[in-house]
């Protein structure tokens, strides 16, 4: 039997979100019913609710940074029990059979993973995200939140945390490596924390020095303003890895000049507009221009355990559900330090 729950949804593209009700499916054999406690607001939510990344499915209940407590489990569930602290990130299913899925890279499922919202599940039904009271998810796409991380600070780890952790690990950020994080926002602040905890020498590249004090407190060793042309002269050939977390188009040629030979510039922010590139910027120095999505389920659990071990959580501003539309505007104005999290008890 399905369950009716309260949620906040965008009824159409660019429309303000409003309170409504949605149906959650009956708990199946391998499902867990999660009582959502907190849901982070990701810039991706805004891109999708406003169709910045293309045509979307409405009504849309955004939210793929979900932290809560297991309320019920299906008869075949073995990983979780009622009362467990759990999380759900950006996907709720995949084909589970392709080469990538078998390798634990469900985020790169060759048939396409099923997004937590703005997607169709295997039954052709739209998925609804975390701006809601409860969600039903297959146990295979649910992760355990360790006791060492508060639930509200854990919610953003399910996207902002894993989106930065995965490329930092893949490109071997660690002792002896110089890593730059472009942008100190929701993703960027977690990139700084994680790169520092991994042992890298961390530099923040931000438009201005406005957040310099914050950046250094979060673990950055250096902080530069990209609005200052001297920055690009001074830092030329400095970094092993640059992780761009911003969703605005950048002058890629300028940023690629900051890499060492064999360095990598990795995009995790996704601008709505195309960007230009002179290929000589990568040919000279055998540099890599790359992108990275989220992580697979196994790596997401690894990231959560790493955060618990190192005492890491997101820097958050807790809001009521009726403040979501205001929060969207503040995200667009870069007026958040550093992740809005919805107290879902207020929905």
Image: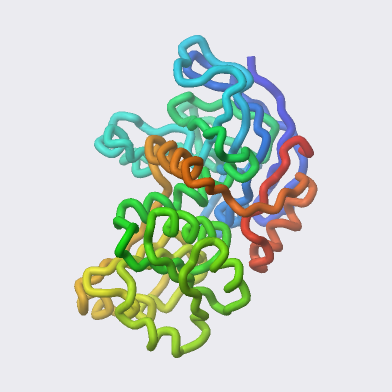
Q: Is residue 222 above or below residue 24?
A: below
Choose top left, top right, bottom left or bottom right for residue 236: bottom left
Horizontal side of 60 relative to 178 (left or right) equals right
Horizontal side of 281 relative to 271 (left or right) equals left
- Looking at the picture, how far across and down is residue 144, in whole percent? 50, 31
Q: Is residue 250 above or below residue 160?
A: below
- Looking at the picture, how far across and down is residue 213, in whole percent? 60, 71
- Looking at the picture, how far across and down is residue 162, in whole percent? 45, 47
Q: Is residue 200 above or below residue 95?
A: below
Q: Residue at x 37, y 82 (%)?
A: 235
In the depicted view, which residue is nearer to us: 200 or 231? 200
In the depicted view, which residue is nearer to us: 224 or 290? 224
In the depicted view, which residue is nearer to us: 200 or 327? 200
Residue extending farthest top = 75
- Looking at the picture, how far across and down is residue 42, in whole percent? 59, 52
Q: Residue at x 54, y 17 (%)?
A: 81
Query: Looking at the rendering, in which quadrant would you find the N terminus?
Result: top right
Q: Residue at x 47, y 17 (%)?
A: 30
Choose top left, top right, bottom left or bottom right for residue 152: top right
Residue 51, visible in the rendered structure: no
Q: Residue at x 60, y 67 (%)?
A: 214
Horizontal side of 169 relative to 319 (left or right) equals left
């Amino acid at each position: 039997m399905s369950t009716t729950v309260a949620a906040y949804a965008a009824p159409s593209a660019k429309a303000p979100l409003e309170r409504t009700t949605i149906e959650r499916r009956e708990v199946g054999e391998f499902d867990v019913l999660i009582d959502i406690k907190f849901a982070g607001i990701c810039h991706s939510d805004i891109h999708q609710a406003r169709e910045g990344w293309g045509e979307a499915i409405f009504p849309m209940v955004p939210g793929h940074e979900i932290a809560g407590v297991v309320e019920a489990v299906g008869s075949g569930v073995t990983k979780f029990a009622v009362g467990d602290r759990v999380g759900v990130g950006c996907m709720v299913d995949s084909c589970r059979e392709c080469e990538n899925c078998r390798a634990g890279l469900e985020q790169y499922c060759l048939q396409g993973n099923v997004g937590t919202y703005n997607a169709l599940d295997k039954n052709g039904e739209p998925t609804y995200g975390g701006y809601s009271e409860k969600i039903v998810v297959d146990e295979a796409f649910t992760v355990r939140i360790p006791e060492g991380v508060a639930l509200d600070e854990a919610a953003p780890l399910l996207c902002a945390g894993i989106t930065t952790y995965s490329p930092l690990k893949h490109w071997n950020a660690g002792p002896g490596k110089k890593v730059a994080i472009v942008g100190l926002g929701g993703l960027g602040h977690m990139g700084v924390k994680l790169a520092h905890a991994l042992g890298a020498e961390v530099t923040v590249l931000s438009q201005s020095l406005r957040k310099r004090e914050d950046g250094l407190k979060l673990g950055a060793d250096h902080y530069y303003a990209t609005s200052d042309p001297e920055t690009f002269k001074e830092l030329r050939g400095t970094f092993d890895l640059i992780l761009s977390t911003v969703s605005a188009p950048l002058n890629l040629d300028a940023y690629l000049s900051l890499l060492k030979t064999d360095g990598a510039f990795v995009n995790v922010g996704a601008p709505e507009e195309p960007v230009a590139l002179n290929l000589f910027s990568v040919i000279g120095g055998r540099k890599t221009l790359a992108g990275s999505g989220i992580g697979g389920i196994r790596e997401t659990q690894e990231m959560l355990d790493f955060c618990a071990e190192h005492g890491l959580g997101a820097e958050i501003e807790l809001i009521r559900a009726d403040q979501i539309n205001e929060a969207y505007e503040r995200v667009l104005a870069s007026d958040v330090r550093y992740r809005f999290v919805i107290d879902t008890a207020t929905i």
